[in-house]
Amino acid sequence: MIENTKYKNRWNFAFIDESTKKEIRRKLLKAVAIPGYQCPYSSPEMPISRGWGTGGLHVTLAIIGREDIFKIIDQGSDASVNACNLRDFVHAMTGCGTTFDTRKATLIQTRHRITEEALTDKQIYVLQVPQPEPLRSVERYEYRTRQMHGEADYAKMWVSLYESYVRHGDILLGAGYPVRVNGRYIMATTPIPRWDIPNLHQAETPYLFGAGREKRLYAIPPHTTVEPLEFEDVRFHIEDFSGALCYQTGYGKAFLDEIYGDDGSRQWVVNDSNFLDKLKNGETIVPFMNPYLEKLPS
Amino acid sequence: MNGTNDQWLLRVSNLTKIYGEPDERTLEHTGPEWNTNICPFTDSIVACAGVSFDLYPGEVLGIVGESGSGKSTVVKLLYFDLEKTAGEARLSPYDDGRSDMLAASGQQKRRIRNHLMGMVYQNPRDGLNFRFSSGGNIAEKLIMAGQMHVGGIRQRAAFLLEKTEIPVRRMDDTPANFSGGMQQRVQIAKAIANNPPLLFLDEVTTGLDVSVQARVLDLIRELQQELGIAMIVVSHDLSVIRMLTDRTLVMKNGRIVEGGLTDQILQDPQHAYTQLLVSSLL
């Protein structure tokens, strides 16, 4: 007998109704077709409030299938509250497999990090975005920023970088450093650290960005040029941990968290929890490699 | 196009800006003869109409008139701050003066603005971003023209600030902390950052006290002589016009009522309104 899946549950597969999913998929196609362009979409109601990962959830639920293996991380951790609850929700709504293992996952949703382990062309990477508009800090009006994107008028953005350099001696943007995608649109990298930005460039994996509160989708398709904004004499650089090593594994080529002890002492630990576990278990890992990481002393 | 007299830098013909919904009677029933620029039938407002003139390289043209006469509108139309209703303007470095720059695409307009024009507004807040440092304001123009070297930008900004007599060590202060005269000079530095052939000055000395006015005017005259920039100077102040300009247009109710050499206009005004203007000079 063919199993009746349609009326088995009181909710539709993946929570969102089919026509809305179709709409989100169409907007995703548009976003992929114009790399870095912010595509408006419906942003339907979710059982969590907008701005708490709804954008990422919309993308995930619109593209997930029954065979997918889902992984979700929050600031690098599989076990944080936000990650756990969204994982439970997606699993309950789809019955998909879930995993902590970056390698095994086919669909990864994330808040504010890209995994240390290299991603493949068999995976899709979904990012939750709080503020999709990179120009918001220099231009408060939406109609003006749209015009600026339309005409590639990015002088104000550059001036703000110049100002930051003049005032502080460096471009002080820890997270969400702006990038130019495919030589055209300037795009907000959702608050991922600078560390992860080179991994967006010419990647194997499609990166899909969803901003639920702001109702925007955008994307970096595989093998797309992504350049962080930099001047000829003031270059982009990744975080400098000054040679600090993970206190659990002695590893130094990953993004590190700084942990303060009760006595004021400091220790560092690898931020990506699955990566840390694999390091501890001595499993073979293929981490992301990029020119900035290669420059680090090993 | 015009093989005989194409020495001009800017050729403006029939430039018109009307707010509201005009009909065919609007232009006939407004203007200095009617002493109004509001159409009695449609209530549309004729900010300026039928403005035509040529500007030659290195020339300084004054536009004078009472407030509401449309002089600022002309400059703002030419600087793309406003959209024209009719007419055209050709700039000889843009497409060799063959096409109307006012009909160009937004991207082209921005290019023209960044490479071929500079603007100094009456209010420094219109021309400067007070959240950026004065160096950053100048950098904006340079970046728009493709300068992507911070060291180079700072060198050029320092040079321009020195030229406009602003202490270079105040380069990284915001113009909000400057006096009115200094703000105006930062605006001038920004406007000439890319060596444009054409500069618009919209009531630049209004609101400054007399000694500061004199220094700003001196600066403008110096720059004009040194760099040979063509300028359009808009002012209601005849002494400014006398000091800066070679040729003057007198506007009233959105129309040009008289034009000619500045000395001639001031010595021997022909139109009744110009006579009034000259005679009311303090």
Image (tube, rainbow, N blue to C red):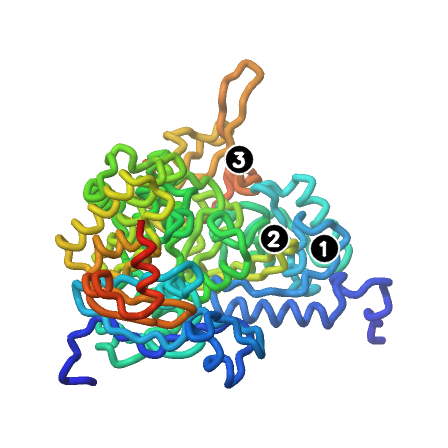
Say which label, 3 or 1, has the lower sequence index. Answer: 1
| Number of disc labels | 3
Where, by quadrant of the figure, is residue B94 drawn?
bottom left
Q: Residues within 10 Å of mark 3 (few under 14, many from 20)?
A: few
Question: What amino acid does circle 2 point to?
Answer: Gln
Q: Which residue is mark 3?
A: A280
> Which chain is mark 2 on?
A
Marks 1/2 in contact by CB < 8 Å: the verdict is: yes
Q: Is residue A169 left or right of residue B1?
A: right
Local SS, label 2: strand
Q: Quadrant of the C terminus of chain A?
A: top left
Tell me how far mark 3 sits from mark 1, CA to CA: 29 Å
Q: Which residue is mark 2?
A: A109
Local SS, label 1: helix
> Which chain is mark 1 on?
A
When the figure is inspected, residue A271 is found, relative to residue A201, above or below; the finding is: above
Say which label, 2 or 3, has the lower sequence index. Answer: 2
Question: What amino acid does circle 3 point to?
Answer: Lys
- Same-chain status of marks 2 and 3: yes
Say which label, 1 or 2, has the lower sequence index. Answer: 1
Q: Is residue A283 left or right of residue B272?
A: right
Which residue occupies the foreground of this view, B94 or B203? B203
As drawn, the label of residue B151 is none
Q: Nearer the viewer, mark 3 or mark 1?
A: 1
Tell me how far mark 2 sits from mark 3, CA to CA: 24 Å
Q: Residues within 10 Å of mark 1 (few under 14, many from 20)?
A: many
- In the image, what residue occupies the spot 20% across and 85% down? B1
Q: Residues within 10 Å of mark 2 (few under 14, many from 20)?
A: many
Question: What amino acid does circle 1 point to?
Answer: Val
